[in-house]
Amino acid sequence: MTQMNANNLSPAHAAADRARRPRGLWRAASLLAVVLAATQLQGCFILALGAVGTTAYVATDRRTAGSILEDNTIQLKADNRISTALGGYANVRAVSYNQQVLLVGQVPTEADKLKAAEVVQGVPNVKAVLNEIDVGPVADLNRSATDTLITTKVRARLIDAHDIFGNAFKVTTSNSVVYLMGIVTQREADRAVEIARDTTGVSKVVTMFNIISEQQLQQIQNPQKTNAPPPEPRGNNPA
């Protein structure tokens, strides 16, 4: 791949270079926004965050321990490959759940967007890639903070819902679009989409679910019984 330097940048890459310099400040501010936003949410959610540690989270995750480890490995490899392929002119995040990878963020050109998906598809054990990267300037402070706040709100509402298990869902937001991932029944999927759609600030909901039957859900919740067959990938659908 052609090596780029500061004297040989296209206008799009130059703009991206200027935009990315204060990114560390934006991310720090976004983190602060999460903390401030969370304090405005219901007290039961705040208590849940404080009480549930990593071990408890793994125990309630519907993925196997091996699948969780594999997802963490995929995310690390995907981020490294994207960074190597696109350099510092892209702001792309890879989110892996059950070996399905969601790509969100911003890149300067359409070619960069396609390249990001290509290198991630080559990561071992990746089953599917949903490329939702935006072509354009890196998100500014307000955009990043708004997305973080939306994610926090949706997670809180899923956890507060009495008819579904909120921890079964992975929530990501980019440019006000909410992405839902998880191993869930169709009933749970429909309810989660309804909750996300009704959350203030959400412009669209996109799903990337592994749909299982109610019987399979019971087998996951009761491992003493015969193991259910692994769920097949199903999703990549705007909801």
Image: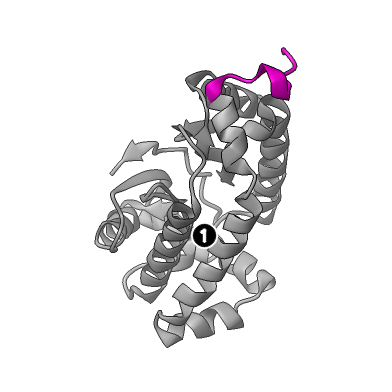
Q: Residue furthest front?
A: 7
Q: On the rendered structure, is 117 left or right of 207?
A: right
* Residue 74 at x, y percent in the picture: 68, 40
* Residue 111 at x, y percent in the picture: 53, 18
Q: Is residue 6 magenta-colored?
A: yes
For disc 1, the neighbor class at 10 Å (few under 14, some 14 to 19, many from 20) is some
Q: Secondary structure at mark 1?
A: helix
* Residue 159 at x, y percent in the picture: 41, 72
Q: On the rendered structure, is 183 left or right of 201?
A: right
Q: Residue at x 68, y 17 (%)?
A: 8
Q: On the rendered structure, is 111 left or right of 124?
A: left
Observer-nearest residue: 210 or 41? 41
Q: On the rendered structure, is 214 left or right of 30?
A: left
> Does the image show residue 206?
yes
Eyeballing the image, is 73 above or below 113? Answer: below
Quarter placement of the C terminus:
top left
Q: Quadrant of residue 95?
A: top right
Quarter placement of the N terminus:
top right
Observer-nearest residue: 192 or 23? 23
Q: Which residue is mark 1?
A: 220
Residue range (magenta): 2-11
Observer-nearest residue: 38 or 209? 38
Eyeballing the image, is 104 above or below 120? Answer: below
Magenta stretch prevailing secondary structure: loop
* Residue 202 at x, y percent in the picture: 31, 55
Observer-nearest residue: 150 or 126? 150
> Does the image show residue 165?
no
Eyeballing the image, is 179 above or below 32? Answer: above
Q: Is residue 64 magenta-colored?
A: no
Q: Residue at x 33, y 73 (%)?
A: 161
Residue type, label 1: Ile
